[in-house]
Amino acid sequence: MRTSEGVWSADHVRLQRGGTLKQARIVWKTYGTLSPKRDNVILYPTSYGAHHTDIEWLVDVRHCLDPSRYFIVIPNMMTNGLSSSPSNTPDFPQVTTFDNVMLQRQMLVELFGIDRLKLVYGWSMGAQQAYHWGALFGEAVERIVVNCGSAKTAPHNFVFLEGIRTTLQAAATPQQGLRAMGRIYAGWALSQTFYRREMWRGLGFDSLEDFLVRSWEANFLRRDRDDLLAQLFTWQHGDISANDLYRGDLQMALAGIKAKVLLMPSATDLYFQTDDNREELPHLKYGKLVEIPSVWGHRAGNPRDNSEDAAFIDAQVEALLND
């Protein structure tokens, strides 16, 4: 598989919340070959706390993001520790999903001459970015996949994140906060049924405590506390209508999406709930809702260790791409 990676930057970037980045940087990686007509491009934004290396497992000839057919671009979100973030940029300002996708658009044009996307595929915060792409760039986006995400962060989702934020800020040390964050997250990202059936055993863990320590605590200890807090802000303020184009009118923003939209929530997701997508669906011109029938909660949408849900997602996305 042909790959390429690098860092793209833009100087003196004015942000939606009023701050300025003297230099905004996006770390990117591509997979596959761009067609002569530049008509085989899939954008695959990162999710909360993730680097491109955490999500690139889906870029595979055995999966829907097939690099033998498509040119797949993963732009790392600002605040994820690779692209511009508090850990690598002094006096880092507040950034929004709007800021991220505007810079991604500029990067694609300047680096690759790409002005149209076959698909934007996103899970979780990546799904929020996919929704923003559809709402902001109209004719430039043919399809979007909103996998365990929403057009606007729901109030209950906001409250869940408040628990994470205050835990990180109240801890005596960053490491204590990250360990506690992992344990809180473990109870939200997977369903009650997952734990009742002790499905963590199938992932190679000897006990529930082993799962919490080696999977959840270890996952967040890889990251910088201030990066995670900055990305929480971006998540909490996710809203495709929070811009000058739609002025807070969410229904108008949904109706403004010209792309074919696949809404793909998990049946057991505890914070990006199917009901959020059900309320969005009637306002979309070309929308389809297909629920992942899974007990893996939010993690059903990123099933690296779950072949059944991966096969379900592959089938739905391939059908959309062939439509």
Image (cartoon, rainbow, N blue to C red):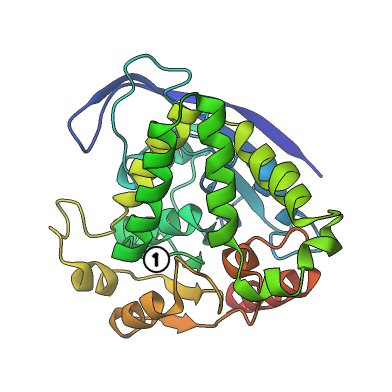
Is 115 drawn above or below residue 11 in the view shown? below
Residue 292 lies, in percent from the top left, at: 61, 78
Residue 177 lies, in percent from the top left, at: 50, 34
Q: Quadrant of the C terminus?
A: bottom right
Amino acid type at image mark 1: Ser
Q: Residue at x 81, y 55 (%)?
A: 207
Q: Residue at x 29, y 33 (%)?
A: 94
Is 18 drawn above or below residue 322 in the view shown? above
Residue 48 lies, in percent from the top left, at: 51, 46
* Residue named by callout 1: 150
Can residue 44 be seen in this snapshot?
Answer: no
Q: Quadrant of the N terminus?
A: top right
Is 319 drawn above or below residue 215 in the view shown? below
Residue 66 lies, in percent from the top left, at: 73, 59
Q: Nearer the viewer, residue 23 or 301?
A: 301
Q: Nearer the viewer, residue 248 or 33?
A: 248
- Answer with left or right where residue 29 lies relative to residue 279: right
Can residue 213 be seen in this snapshot?
Answer: yes
Q: Residue at x 57, y 60 (%)?
A: 187
- Answer with left or right where residue 316 lies relative to residue 60: left
Mark 1 burial class by Cα count in 10 Å: few <14, some 14-19, many 20+: many
